[in-house]
Image (cartoon, rainbow, N blue to C red):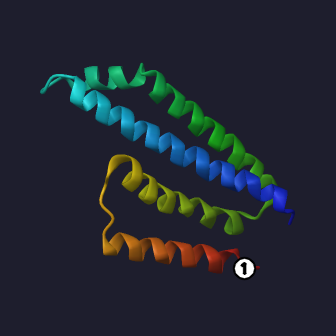
């Protein structure tokens, strides 16, 4: 398999992770901005009309398009395990950006994910 085709896998994972980080940022922002006890529909309206949330939806669509290209190049059983790398990247990014905790159990889980991807990528 051509190395270039793997760029679509990387792009899918990157777009997914970036979109999730944007969502977390904007949900946290609006949660702090809006009054306590606000109606959930008002909260969702603020989110769905937020430029960055709209961008995250567009990123999800781009990730889906990238994934469609992946499916034309690889067997699903080969490509799909790579999507679990998004868990690893989100863990690291959420620690760096949002100061979320990294526990030993999370690290063990991430290690299992990485080992699983390595094993499943061997053909």
Residue 29 sits above or below residue 74 on the image: above
**Left or right of 97, for residue 80:** right
Q: Is residue 86 left or right of residue 36?
A: right
- Residue 2 location, x and y as percent? 87, 62
Position of residue 82 measured from the top left corner of the image (x, y, whole percent)? 62, 63
Q: Quadrant of the N terminus?
A: bottom right
How far across and down, in percent of the image, does residue 69 sit?
77, 48
Vertical arrangement, residue 107 with respect to residue 60, above or below: below
**Vertical order, 41 against 70 (above or below):** above
Q: Circle 1 is placed at which residue position?
A: 122
Residue 45 x/y as whole percent: 34, 20
Q: Residue at x 37, y 25 (%)?
A: 47
Q: Is residue 16 above or below residue 56?
A: below
Q: Quadrant of residue 44?
A: top left
Q: Secondary structure at mark 1?
A: loop
User: For the point 60% across and 52% down, which residue is it?
Assistant: 13
Q: Is residue 14 left or right of residue 36?
A: right
Q: Quadrant of residue 38?
A: top left
Front-lying residue, 69 or 108: 108
97 or 27, nearer to the observer: 97
Q: Dot 1, how many residues are within 10 Å of its Cα: few (below 14), some (14-19), or many (20+)? A: few
Residue at image coords 54%, 63%: 84
């Amino acid at each position: 398999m051509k190395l270039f085709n793997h760029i679509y896998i990387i792009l899918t994972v990157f777009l997914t992770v970036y979109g999730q980080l944007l969502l977390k940022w904007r949900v946290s922002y609006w949660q702090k901005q809006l009054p306590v006890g606000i109606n959930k529909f008002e909260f969702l309206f603020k989110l769905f009309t937020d430029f960055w949330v709209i961008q995250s939806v567009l990123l999800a669509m781009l990730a889906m398009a990238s994934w469609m290209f992946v499916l034309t190049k690889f067997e699903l059983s080969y490509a799909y395990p790579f999507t679990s790398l998004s868990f690893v990247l989100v863990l690291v990014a959420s620690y760096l950006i949002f100061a979320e905790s990294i526990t030993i159990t999370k690290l063990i889980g991430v290690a299992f994910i990485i080992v699983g991807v390595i094993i499943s990528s061997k053909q």
